Amino acid sequence: MSLTAGEKEALLQLARSSLRAGVQQQPLPTPETAGKAAGRFWQESGGAFVTLTKGKMLRGCIGLIESTGPLADTIIHMAVAAGIEDSRFPTVRVEEVEDIAIEISILTPLQPVANIQEIRLGQDGVLIRRGPQSGVFLPQVARETGWDLERFLNELCTHKAGLPTRAWEDSSTELYRFSAEVFHE
């Protein structure tokens, strides 16, 4: 999905108003109240992550890899979840909402990985799954950390999926890649 600058701005505004409403325990935006962002994003489905930062510190990040619902609805609920449901961080307070920067990652559909050399580090995000355990790194994680592919996959196993370090080498482990259109305020 290739978004225009206006569409990106509309989705960022939608995420911002959703975060604000969620933190204030107010009604969330709907197609009728969302204004400019209501367009095609209420008809198209897709996975998305919303990442919140304050200064240079991560403040919350939650998303859906795949969604059958409208993309706008996914962004609304992930913005709220990143602010108040990410158990790694304290809940965003009303007085700090305007100090929070928002980044949105719109995801492409998952593609199975047969060989790890298919993974384009810094361009692809990766989902790992074995039984009920799974974890995901967005494409920007490799760019931000500078990890090589092996370290990227080992960290994904241990820190995101709760799997043994080299579980990605096990034939019972599934690997998927995806790309993302990432934009921020």
Image: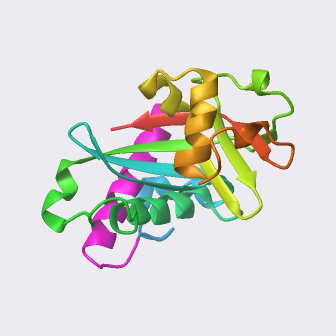
What are the residue bounds of the magenta stretch?
1-28
Quarter of the figure that contains the N terminus: top right
Observer-nearest residue: 129 or 139? Answer: 129
Question: For this view, does 96 lie left or right of residue 26?
Answer: left
Observer-nearest residue: 106 or 159? Answer: 159
Q: Where is residue 155, by image quadrant?
A: top right
Q: Could you tell me residue 32's position as x and y percent? A: 47, 71
Residue 44 in view in this figure: no
Q: Is residue 80 magenta?
A: no
Residue 181 in view in this figure: yes
Residue at 68% in and 60% down: 133
Observer-nearest residue: 28 or 66? Answer: 66
Q: Could you tell me residue 164's position as x and y percent? A: 65, 47
Give the main secondary structure of the magenta stretch: helix
From this view, report whether residue 27 is shown above or below residue 143.
Answer: below
Residue at 69% in and 55% down: 66
Q: Where is residue 42, by image quadrant?
A: bottom right
Q: Could you tell me residue 25's position as x and y percent? A: 29, 79
